């Protein structure tokens, strides 16, 4: 992918400049709640205690001829430190300097081997110390610091190969590493740092292709393709990961390709010249990777990347490894860090940064300093949520008595639950085929159970209870309910899933409540080309949802609350400009006037962690802990909730951002409502990380994207068939 044209703010920084709070008059003065028991909270953020206070200068950098490799671009520019100075930050396209160059446009000449490259430095803009663009450069500077500490970049994160942990029994290696970001929050700029791990297998793609089983038989092409395609491989010679999209059985390392200069070279010679690596098997096929596809490039043809299996290490866990208790136990001991261990690791990391002489010299050039202690502030623990047992409970338990005494071969009783499929194994193709048939061709709510699960007398009651509960709610039964405190309100959950079969397709799951008790739900899927706005199919979903609500209640809902999951970094502005207006327009066409609407963006993949201090030790916060100060943003109406408890490791909070609100929720009101909805997911008799409509939408999109690959039959739209 060409580096040229990528100028501007990165995705996460694009969201920083979006001000949603300016339109929410009712929280103009404060977005902080007051209800609940106050508790002291620590977080994995380190305050920036010193940073540049003067104007800095941004320059665009161009190369002639065009240079694609980011490292080469940096090396070519750094040949002119006399001109740009020792103190500079370069992102591959633009340069930040603390001083202004004499000329508006400076042309320089660099050497790249035997080639001459013209480097043009042209003034772009002045940046104030408060500019979001400055924060982006500080992040680039900190990544430079991580490289100085001998950490290896893999993807977006940095890992310490020198402290790699080997599990020889399992043929696995773990690289410990860190995720970091410097961003501005309500009261300060902070460095958020968290521990991360990269899991590698002591097995190459070549080992998998050439594997011989106990009967001295090699795998056939079909089995190899099934195992490799879709997997992620890691190449140590450049510390990069690639997704395997295909295997080219016609080409070998002897095949040739054109280098950027136009000359042809074999893969064997390229790896020997470029990386000093010797490819031993010259007959092995080549792996094909299409690279990371971006919607902005959907019409741009690009050559796939060809990889030599022998040089590609497999990553992640196989299904067999996941089922192996010993593997999972040993990995958990090193990767699931409890709050005390996590704090220790992060404190050690910050100490290394502050003791590293080269790193400190680089930071001092920019007067950048960090606090060495976790940021702390107050959080609140909300009241426990009262659960009201479903009215069908007695019938359910009576059935369970009968269910618990049946033998594995006696499933006639279970058939009264519509369809129960007892599978001989957990083969994905078997499950997918059954689900596709029962969700599309012969639409019936169904439950699949692997036979060996039923072959455990000591846990049969628990398993039977779970099966009965799932079948009950799939057929429209209510297991329990929670009082939301709102009357005549419809709740909507939206989430997206990328189809693993067709990379250019994605599925949006749309789920909405049908009754006021939130015990019945409508669902619909929207298939869209990658890069296509979801709004194109949203109108039909909303109209169908409102039609079904009216059929059940004989009136339309007075308020509509949307929980929108699946929003990536940099998509916030598009959501506000396109999706919210479409929702409002669709509702207006039904109501004839504006209706009370709240839209909340839900984010699960975050690196912020919270810790509470009990008896002098850091522990996970209690379920129901809400944080709306310290690491929230001035320009947003946002908050964090720790809704569930975890047995091992550190709990991950969920971030909520209210981007539209004509219901006029108070901070306490929306926080309590959100927490209550986390209790309404029928597939787990406990509290989940996100509100139930969100997780229902995720389960729907996931089932369709993983197994069905087409729209479910409309007759299932009012059933929770996807649980």
Image (cartoon, helix red, strand yellow):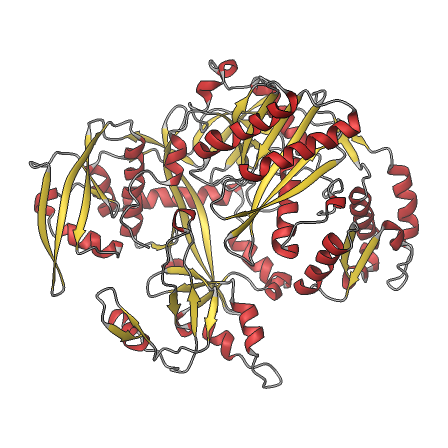
Give residue 479's position: percent from left, percent from top.
80, 37
Q: Does residue 341 sit above or below 51 in this rendering?
A: below
User: Which quarter of the picture shows residue 689?
Assistant: top right
Residue 705 in view of the camera? yes
Q: Does residue 721 sit above or below 668 in this rendering?
A: below
Which residue occupies the foreground of this view, 505 or 165? Answer: 505
Q: In the displayed structure, does residue 376 sit left or right of residue 593? A: left
- In this view, the residue farthest toward the bottom is 216
Q: In the displayed structure, does residue 408 sit left or right of residue 239? A: right
Which residue: 66% across, 55% down?
Answer: 708
Give residue 16's position: percent from left, percent from top.
39, 31
The mark total stands at 0
Which residue occupies the foreground of this view, 362 or 396? Answer: 396
User: Which quarter of the picture shows residue 221?
Assistant: bottom right
Which residue: 13% across, 46% down?
Answer: 120
Which residue: 41% across, 35% down?
Answer: 45
Q: Does residue 630 sit above or below 180 in this rendering?
A: above
Give residue 485's position: percent from left, percent from top.
70, 21
Which residue: 87% across, 54% down?
Answer: 414
User: Which quarter of the picture shows residue 486?
Assistant: top right
Residue 204 in view of the camera? no
Q: In the displayed structure, does residue 26 sit left or right of residue 526? A: left
Where, quadrant-wise, is the N terminus in this rendering? bottom left
Which residue occupies the foreground of this view, 374 or 603? Answer: 603
Give residue 554's position: percent from left, percent from top.
78, 24
Q: In the displayed structure, does residue 303 sit left or right of residue 480? A: left
């Amino acid at each position: 992918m060409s580096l040229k044209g990528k100028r501007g703010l990165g995705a996460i920084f694009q969201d920083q400049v979006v001000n949603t709070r300016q339109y929410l008059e009712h929280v103009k003065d404060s977005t902080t709640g007051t209800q609940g028991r106050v508790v002291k909270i620590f977080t994995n953020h380190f305050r920036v205690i010193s940073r540049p206070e003067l104007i800095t200068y941004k320059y665009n950098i161009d190369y002639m001829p065009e240079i694609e490799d980011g490292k080469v671009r940096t090396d070519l520019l750094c040949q002119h430190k006399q001109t740009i100075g020792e103190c500079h930050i370069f992102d591959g396209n633009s340069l930040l300097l603390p001083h202004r160059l004499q000329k508006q446009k400076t042309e320089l000449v660099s050497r790249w081997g035997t080639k001459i490259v013209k480097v043009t430095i042209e003034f772009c803009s002045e940046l104030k110390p408060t500019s979001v663009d400055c924060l982006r450069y500080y992040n680039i500077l900190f990544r430079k610091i991580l490289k100085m500490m001998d950490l290896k970049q893999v993807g977006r994160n940095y890992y310490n190969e020198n402290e790699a942990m080997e599990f020889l029994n399992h043929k696995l290696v773990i690289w410990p590493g860190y995720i970091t970001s410097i961003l501005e929050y309500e009261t300060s700029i902070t460095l958020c740092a968290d521990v991360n791990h990269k899991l590698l297998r002591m097995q190459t793609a070549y080992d998998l292709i050439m594997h011989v089983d106990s009967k001295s038989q090699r795998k056939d092409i079909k089995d190899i393709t099934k195992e490799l395609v879709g997997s992620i491989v890691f190449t140590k010679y450049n510390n990069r990961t690639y997704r395997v999209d295909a295997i080219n059985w016609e080409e070998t390392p002897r095949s040739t390709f054109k280098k950027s200069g136009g000359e042809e070279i074999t893969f064997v010679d390229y790896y020997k010249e470029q990386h000093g690596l010797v490819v031993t098997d010259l007959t092995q096929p080549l792996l094909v990777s299409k690279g990371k596809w971006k919607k902005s490039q959907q019409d741009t043809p690009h050559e796939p990347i060809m990889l030599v299996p022998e040089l590609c290490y497999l990553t992640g866990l196989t299904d067999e490894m996941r089922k192996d208790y010993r593997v999972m136990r040993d990995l958990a001991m090193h990767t699931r860090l409890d709050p005390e261990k996590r704090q220790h690791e992060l404190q050690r990391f910050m100490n290394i940064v502050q003791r590293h002489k080269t790193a400190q010299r680089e930071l001092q050039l920019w007067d950048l300093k960090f606090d060495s202690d976790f940021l702390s502030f107050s959080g609140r623990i909300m009241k426990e949520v009262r659960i009201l047992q479903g009215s069908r409970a007695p019938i359910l338990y009576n059935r369970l008595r009968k269910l618990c005494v049946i033998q594995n071969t006696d499933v006639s009783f279970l058939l009264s639950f519509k369809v129960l499929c007892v599978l001989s194994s957990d083969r994905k193709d078997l499950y997918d085929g059954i689900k596709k048939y029962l969700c599309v061709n012969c639409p019936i709510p169904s439950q699949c159970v692997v036979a060996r699960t039923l072959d455990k007398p000591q846990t049969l009651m628990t398993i039977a209870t779970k099966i009965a509960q799932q079948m009950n709610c799939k057929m429209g039964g209510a297991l329990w309910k929670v009082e939301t405190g709102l009357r005549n309100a419809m709740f909507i959950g939206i989430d997206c899933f990328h189809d693993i079969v067709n990379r250019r397709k994605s599925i949006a799951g749309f789920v909405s409540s049908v009754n006021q008790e939130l015990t019945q739900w409508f669902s619909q899927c929207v298939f869209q080309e990658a890069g296509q706005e979801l709004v194109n199919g949203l109108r039909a979903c909303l109209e169908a949802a409102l039609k079904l609500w009216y059929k059940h209640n004989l009136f339309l809902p007075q308020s509509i609350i949307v929980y929108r999951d699946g929003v990536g970094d940099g998509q916030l502005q598009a959501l506000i400009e396109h999706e919210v207006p479409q929702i409002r327009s669709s509702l207006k066409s039904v109501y004839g006037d504006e209706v009370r609407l709240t839209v909340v963006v839900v984010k699960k993949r975050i690196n912020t962690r919270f810790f509470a201090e009990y008896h002098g030790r850091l522990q996970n916060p209690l379920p129901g802990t809400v944080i709306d100060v310290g690491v929230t943003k001035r320009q947003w109406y946002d908050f964090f909730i720790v809704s569930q408890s975890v047995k091992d490791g550190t709990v991950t909070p969920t971030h909520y951002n209210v981007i539209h609100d004509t219901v006029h929720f108070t901070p306490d009101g929306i926080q309590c409502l959100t927490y209550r909805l986390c209790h309404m997911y029928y597939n787990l008799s406990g509290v989940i990380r996100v509100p139930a409509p969100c997780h229902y939408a995720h389960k729907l999109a996931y089932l369709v994207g993983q197994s069905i690959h087409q729209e479910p039959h409309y007759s299932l739209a009012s059933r929770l068939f996807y649980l």
